Image (cartoon, rainbow, N blue to C red):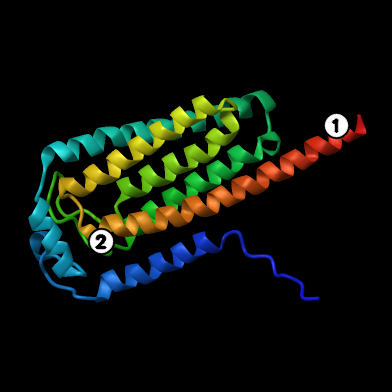
Amino acid sequence: MKVKKKKNPYRFGIFMLVLFVLFTIAVKFIDVDHIGAKNSEIGFSTINVFFFFLLGYNALCYGISKYFGYLVLLTACMFALMGFIQLLRRRSIAKLDKNFISLAIFYAAIAFVYVFFELFVINYRPVILDEGLEPSYPSSHTILAICIMGSAIVQFKRLFKDRKQRKIANLTAMMICSIVVIFRFMSGVHWFTDIIGGMIISIGMVSIYNQAFMRIEIANRRKLRKRNALK
């Protein structure tokens, strides 16, 4: 009798992260041309120029993506505050819920990605805003929107026991995320590949986080059952 091998629950997330690495290499070396602001280089120049001239720079879309981005950061602050309050009450990091610890690690991973691509620049924005040439790949707003709102939806499974409340919270998170990503692309402050790259790595990261969360929840339920059995 053949024993079925258990599939790696993180396989999709890992696949997306590998895809992101390959896509990033492609952006750096395929169809590179000096067509960016101040004659800066950009990969996949043909398709990127097509979308940039199709949409152009739109200040209204930029403003919408910017201000809805604040809602994304506010969501992250809300969860950070919840974790901090629990830390004050329990007076030990070791006593924190593993869900909050995993979320803190996830936020640290987002910060690492942001800092990494600020230091190792793949390309620059197609337009100059206030600070001259700025790193553009991957789109940080896209990463923040998908990762923070995606992880929020995962956390809502635990926070909202009522299905209607959870559904409303999920729809709100998805709406905010979609607005940020769509209007960021339409604003023209990023190349098309910046948005795509941001989406690929974000989906991979959220997928891995979701799987980790599910395993923490399963472990918590098992502990609860054992405690109830001993009573």
Quadrant placement of the C terminus: top right
In the rendered view, would you say 44 is above or below 102? Answer: below
User: Taking 31 as reference, is 116 left or right?
Assistant: right
Amino acid marked by disc 2: Thr
Q: Secondary structure at mark 1?
A: helix
Structural distance between the alpha carbons of marks 1 and 2: 52 Å
User: Taking 132 as reference, is 180 left or right?
Assistant: right
Q: Nearer the viewer, residue 35 or 51?
A: 51
Residue at x 42% of width, y 48% of height: 111
- Reading the image, the residue beneath label 2 is 193
Residue at x 14% of width, y 56% of height: 126
Residue 109 in percent (x, y) is at: 48, 51
Earlier residue among tags 1 and 2: 2
User: Taking 118 as reference, is 228 left or right?
Assistant: right
Residue 97 in view here = yes
Quarter of the view holding residue 197 = bottom left
Residue at x 78% of width, y 42% of height: 222
Mark 1 neighbour class, 10 Å CA radius: few under 14, some 14 to 19, many 20 or more:
few
Amino acid marked by disc 1: Asn
Residue 225 in percent (x, y) is at: 82, 37
Residue 57 in percent (x, y) is at: 10, 47
Residue 41 in view here = no
- Reading the image, the residue beneath label 1 is 228
Residue 202, label in figure: none
Quadrant placement of the N terminus: bottom right
In the rendered view, would you say 114 is above or below 66? Answer: below
Q: How many marks?
A: 2
Residue at x 12% of width, y 63% of height: 49
Eye-nearest disc, 1 or 2: 1
